[in-house]
Image (cartoon, grey):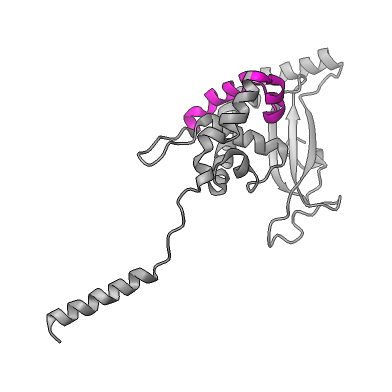
Amino acid sequence: MNRRAAAAIVAICVSIKMRRRKKRSIWVKDWIKRRAQLGAYNQLLTELKNEDPECFKNFLRMTHDDFQYLCNKISPAIKKQDTNMRLAISVEERLAITLRFLPSGDSYRSLPYQFRVPQQTISKIIPECCDAIYRCLKPDYMEVPSSEECWEKNSEDFKNKWNFPNALGALDGKHVVIKVPQHSGNVYYNYKGTFSIALMALVDANYKFIYTDIGCEGRISDQICTLCHYS
């Protein structure tokens, strides 16, 4: 076989292979491309902020001032850089998606239709944003007393405000119902007949959280005082 024939055969093979390739799916769906004009953050929330602050608070469970404060706190942790290919989703929109998800019960599948953000992106935004909120606010709003004087002040507050002496904090637990993880057996099955994780919280005399523990399997009793290391 001469070189010309071999080259022709190779060219034919390449041509056939190219024809058999599947057409690539659209990188971004057309309706998602209109997020900046029609997405919930850029349209609905802007209207609520300007026209009905009470409904803005109802939608995100906080006022616009509190929302902006939280944005400023977590911005360094979650802000993304724009690229030549596309503009990054803003800190404000990332936080709005997260705040809508947490109290509403909306799923990763339903949120894309509100905010016009792909489900795969939302599944990354929400955990990242939750982690940033915890890390950025914990030092200011959930600091465990680190000295004897701090614990003594807690005790004084309980005595003066609630007439309850010798108390360092109010401790309780709650089962948070979850969708049972696959292949977990009865690890998360609790005595109430549901699947859950256990939440433990310690607050001071002014209802301020000073310690939390979340994630213990539901099969563990929520009799916190007999289980935690404070007892």
The structure residue drawn at horizontal position 70% and vertical position 59%, both measured from the top left corner, is: 184
Quarter of the image for the C terminus: give it.
top right
Residue 213 found in image quarter: top right
Above-or-below relation of 55 to 132: above
Q: Is residue 113 visible?
A: yes
Q: Quadrant of the N terminus?
A: bottom left
Locate residue 35, reporting x and y percent. 53, 37
- 78 or 231, which is in the foreground? 78
Q: Is residue 164 left or right of residue 146?
A: right
The overriding secondary structure of the stretch rendered in magenta is: helix
Viewer-side residue, 171 vs 63: 63
Q: Which residues are magenta?
A: 51-77
Question: x, y percentage for residue 126?
Answer: 59, 40
Left or right: 19 with respect to 65?
left
Residue plotted at (53% across, 23% down): 72
Q: Nearer the viewer, residue 121 or 144?
A: 121
Quick check: is 66 in the magenta stretch? yes
- Considering only vertical position in the picture, is 127 above or below 194? above
- Note whether residue 132 is visible: no
- State how many labels appear: 0
Residue 44 locus on image (x, y percent)? 62, 30
Rendering quarter of residue 210: top right
Q: Position of residue 25 (x, y in %)?
A: 46, 57
Q: Residue at x 66, y 21 (%)?
A: 63
**Residue 19: in magenta span:** no
